[in-house]
């Protein structure tokens, strides 16, 4: 029999003593190992429902907590912070995006805000490229055609004609991690890749043989326009009527970033008037998208329910990072993916 000696330092004991008094609330169910990591150190309460909590219920559940894990659909503003009270020290976003949190208010109150970067980029790039292929080849409409029993005549020369992706031009707006990974995937299809970004990425241009252009030139030349920018005052409604008019009539727009980057009413008009060929969207100005939204009735659209990072592996890793952001914050050790400085 072997004896294992475990040495616990005074610092570790101190963290454990303090941590077990801290309360963490998770606004919706997240996968393992996130809950187990938190339960090891904190008093943890998790909403097991799938719906976004109403404001009053959210106020009730955050009362007295020291840390909060929230989702994109949760509006974390001064009212929520007031309801939580003075103990709230860290808000951990189960996402890369953080526009649902009032960062200014959190910083003013010395509340750290964290997110889950470097986790979901590959999954989102995969989904984005799948939307390019699906839109170009009319796959969703063709699938419905078969399933609804409308296929009567076998092979037909002009049935569901689409557009080639191979050797077409891909325009990427925003060359961050996801945009760069999308460019790498496009190389396998011999696409010409052009991009627009606030800052030029000379090294990536050289490595991937891609070209920096103005936003206007990108829209004019691209067969597929894919958006990969964060939401801020500069990107809000970046793509509007004037931008759609620059695009080819045979072009598609793909958005897996943030819905409010596109002026949705202008997109609806552009599709109705056949200014562009189609749109493939995973995000919307208001989520979930209403059944009465004209986009849901159009054959030129592919609409997904915000599933860019929805793989088992990615969502599990996001839960791990979101939980460890809280552990490391209180332990003052390890990596904390902070958005703000406090």
Image (cartoon, rainbow, N blue to C red):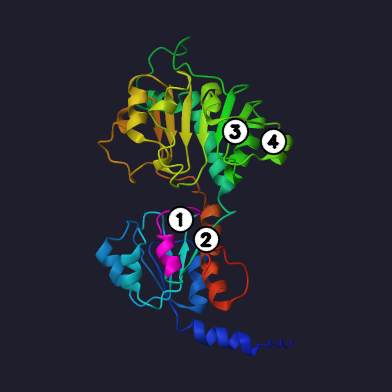
Q: Which residue bears the numbered disc 1?
A: 98
Report x, y in % for residue 297: 30, 29
Kindly report the distance in space between the C-alpha atoms of the residues bearing marks 1 and 3.
Answer: 24 Å
Query: Residue 237, located in which quarter of the rendered image?
Result: top left
Looking at marks 1 and 2 on the same chain, the residue that comes earlier in the sequence is marked by 1
From the viewer's perspective, tell me whether residue 191 is left or right of residue 116.
right
Looking at marks 1 and 3 on the same chain, the residue that comes earlier in the sequence is marked by 1
* Farthest residue, direction top: 157
Q: Which residue bears the numbered disc 4?
A: 205
Label 4 sits on a secondary structure element that is helix
Labels in figure, total = 4
Report x, y in % for residue 306: 42, 45
Do the CB atoms of the residues marked 1 and 2 lie less than 8 Å apart?
yes
Magenta stretch in the rendered image:
96-108
Above or below, comparing residue 32 to residue 308 in the picture: below
Q: Nearer the viewer, residue 238 or 150?
A: 238
């Amino acid at each position: 029999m072997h004896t294992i000696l475990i040495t616990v330092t005074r610092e570790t004991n101190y963290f454990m003593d303090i941590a077990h008094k801290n309360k963490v609330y998770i606004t919706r169910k997240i996968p393992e190992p996130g809950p187990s990591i938190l339960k090891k150190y904190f008093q943890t309460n998790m909403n097991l429902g799938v719906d976004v909590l109403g404001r009053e219920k959210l106020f009730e559940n955050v009362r007295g907590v020291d840390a909060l894990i929230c989702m994109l659909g949760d509006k974390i503003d001064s009212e929520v912070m007031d309801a939580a009270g003075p103990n709230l020290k860290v808000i951990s976003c189960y996402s890369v995006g953080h526009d649902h949190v009032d960062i200014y208010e959190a910083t003013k109150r010395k509340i750290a805000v964290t997110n889950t970067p470097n986790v979901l980029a590959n999954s989102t790039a995969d989904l984005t490229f799948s939307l390019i292929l699906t839109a170009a080849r009319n796959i969703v409409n063709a699938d419905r055609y078969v399933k609804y029993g409308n296929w009567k005549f076998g092979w037909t020369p002009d049935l569901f004609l689409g557009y080639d992706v191979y050797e077409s031009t891909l325009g990427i707006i925003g060359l961050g991690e996801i945009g760069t990974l999308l460019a790498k995937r496009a190389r396998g299809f011999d696409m010409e890749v052009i991009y627009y970004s606030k800052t030029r990425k000379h090294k990536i241009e050289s490595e991937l043989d891609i070209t920096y252009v103005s936003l206007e030139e990108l829209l004019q030349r691209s067969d597929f326009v894919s958006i990969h920018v964060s939401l801020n005052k500069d990107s809000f409604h970046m793509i509007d009527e004037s931008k759609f008019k620059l695009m080819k009539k045979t072009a598609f727009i793909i958005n897996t970033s943030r819905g409010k980057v596109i002026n949705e009413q202008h997109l609806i008009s552009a599709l109705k008037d056949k200014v562009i060929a189609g749109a493939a969207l995973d995000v919307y100005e208001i989520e979930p998208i209403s059944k009465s939204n004209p986009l849901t009735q159009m054959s030129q659209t592919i609409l997904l329910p915000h599933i860019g990072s929805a793989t088992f592996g990615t969502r599990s890793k996001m839960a791990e990072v979101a939980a460890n952001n809280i552990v490391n914050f209180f332990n003052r050790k390890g990596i904390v993916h902070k958005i703000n400085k406090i």
